[in-house]
Amino acid sequence: MTRLAPDQVLSLFEPTRDEAPPEVAWVDGQQVLRRINRRSPRARPVITQIGRVPEDAGTGDPAALVDSLLLRAGERPSFRGPRPIRVADLFSGCGGMSLGVAEACRALGRGFSPVAAFDIDPAALKTYSLNFGLHEPMPADLGTLLAPRLGTRMTPAERALKRRVGRVDIVVAGPPCQGHSNLNNATRRNDPRNGLYFRVARFAELFAPSFIFVENVAMVLHDHGNVVEQTRRGLESLGYIVSHGIVDLSRLGLAQRRRRHVMLATMAGSGSALPRIEEIVELHARPPRSLRWAIGDLKGFHSKSPIDRPTGLKPETQRRIDFLFDHDLYDLPDSERPACHRDKVHSYGSVYGRLRWNQPAPTITGGFDTMGRGRFVHPGLRRTLTPREGARIQGLPDWFDFSPVMLKRSNLVRTIGNAVPPRLTYVLALECLR
């Protein structure tokens, strides 16, 4: 592969419509720059200096260079700027969805202002607050705080919430997905948590944001309560234009195969000419990214921080990992698995498996440091993934501070695994705001 030449201008995307591509990157001397083209031809583009060309930059793909610099950045960028976009994050976790919007605002020369974050996990909220400067996140159960139906009189709690939060421009939401997951054999498709999805529509009724982004597992479409369709109808009754569909985030440059259902709602008049979900994905598509692209530079990296320490392995787990490496295998034979896999037919071929350098990772979950919960064995080292490697695969940059959840390893891994990769909301926000 060839190194970028100085002053070489290369488009990050091939335009699919009769307009300038959303982003362009180039190298000026040793500096990598990004230009965001506005939708209006009369609007001036916005140029951001991303960083210096790395010593090991052996690629001619400018998209990979820009994304790599953002992912490996050790210093938090400033998200302050003029005309800040006010964002509320529902079911926020550590804030992956907010992070994508914040970067889109920065790319457009706008400020990012988080005005509310809601989650039932206090440690995750502390992580959100630490990274985004929101001093009063709300450890609220939105299933209790918000009314379950549209058109009902505001409750006292909802009135207080409106006074506290004020204007909201963008709502991002990642409702709990465990009730829809294929890994949930107890209450799949018929879990009480599934109804939380509709609370997004109630929040929209109260605050009338211009844009709404909702992410969930693909199987949400098969919920017994038909929550996606009910939410779509509810939002349309409030005057929103709604587009939704399944997105594999590996198509957007994530080094991970992660199929998710995405809903985009725009208030009529705010973005009625926006592309649909499928068109946005095509407009912002990236070449496939491998695991080596995401974490290859960490192979020889060591630190005492919990985020860089691999989990301690039981002797039987270490034996299974050694078996994979000693026999140059990526899938563990049934003969080396627990009895529940040896003695009956199963469909968990990737479980206990080893990752491949030249391919994206499979979906990262809240158990990515455990061999028995997926294909999470490092491709070149006899261990499972570290939390930092999991964060990189999720698209969470090195500067992101997980201190509030580091005291307990299971909290750290779960927080990273449950995050929504910010690359998704970056492209959605960019399309809505540019």
Image: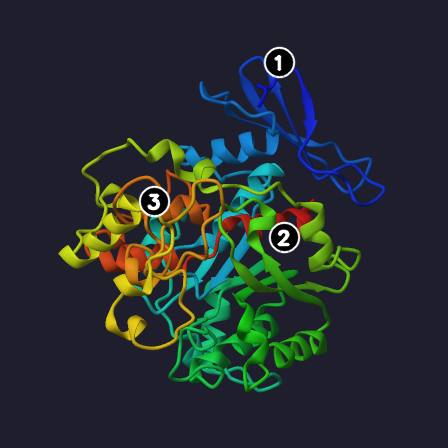
Whole-percent x, y for residue 158 in the image? 48, 76
Instruction: Look at the picture and state if 296 lies above or below 157.
Output: above
Residue 16 is left or right of residue 354, and the answer is: right
**Residue type for callout 2:** Leu
Q: Residue at x 27, y 44 (%)?
A: 326
**Residue type for callout 3:** Asp
Q: CA distance from mark 1 to mark 3?
A: 42 Å
Q: Residue at x 28, y 40 (%)?
A: 381
Q: Are marks 1 and 2 in contact (CB under 8 Å)?
A: no
Secondary element type, mark 1? loop
Residue 180 visible in rendering: yes
**Residue type for callout 1:** Pro
Q: Within 10 angstroms of label 3, few (less than 14), some, or many (20 or more) residues?
A: few
- Residue bearing the label numbered 3: 328
Q: CA distance from mark 3 to mark 2?
A: 41 Å
Q: Are marks 3 and 2 in contact (CB under 8 Å)?
A: no
| Label annotation for residue 6 | 1
- Residue bearing the label numbered 2: 428
Q: Residue at x 70, y 44 (%)?
A: 434
